Image (cartoon, rainbow, N blue to C red):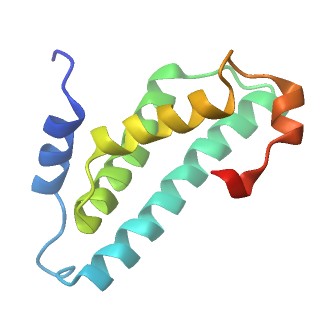
Amino acid sequence: MGEITFTEYQAAAERTANSQTVSTDEQRFANFGMGLSGEAGEVTDLLKKVVFHGHTLDAAELEKELGDVLWYVAALANTAGLSLAGIAEKNVAKLRARYPEGFDVVRSIKREVTAE
């Protein structure tokens, strides 16, 4: 499988969203938000085992779990009428404004969140 665009991924993710029992926007936001939290927890648990329990990183498992996180992000974006590409572009612009020369500890400590 080759690389796909955010737009292609978002459409593919929507194809597998549960529209039979999760039909309203409110239900979609709740289901996908809870799913995102659960999958992020699985990523966290995997990393916790690597950092604190002496496990070796299983990159294939991390990739699988990150894919599940991405699916829920795409489903939430679809529900809100947002595009992943647009989200990514705005996030990069925010980070460039925050760290014009790349990450900087001092800028991180002194940044004004209200300006974002």
Is residue 107 rendered to the left or right of residue 63? right
Q: Which residue is drawn at 18% across and 69% down?
A: 18
Q: Residue at x 38, y 35 (%)?
A: 89
In the depicted structure, whether residue 31 falls above or below residue 85:
below
Q: Where is residue 9 in the image (x, y as percent from the top left)?
A: 20, 38
Q: Position of residue 53 (x, y in %)?
A: 81, 33
* Nearest to the observer: residue 27 or residue 18: 27
Quarter holding the N terminus? top left
Q: Can residue 41 be seen in this view?
A: yes
Q: Position of residue 90 (x, y in %)?
A: 43, 41
* Nearest to the observer: residue 7 or residue 57: 7
Is residue 44 rendered to the left or right of residue 25? right
- Quarter of the view holding residue 16: bottom left
View extreme (front): residue = 115
Q: Can residue 53 be seen in this view?
A: no
* Nearest to the observer: residue 41 or residue 108: 108
Q: Which residue is drawn at 82% across and 31% down?
A: 107
Q: Which residue is drawn at 68% across and 26% down?
A: 99
Q: Position of residue 24 (x, y in %)?
A: 21, 84
- Tell how many labels: 0
Is residue 24 rendered to the left or right of residue 57? left
In the depicted structure, whether residue 52 falls above or below residue 37:
above
- Quarter of the view holding residue 25: bottom left
In the depicted structure, whether residue 91 falls above or below residue 59:
below
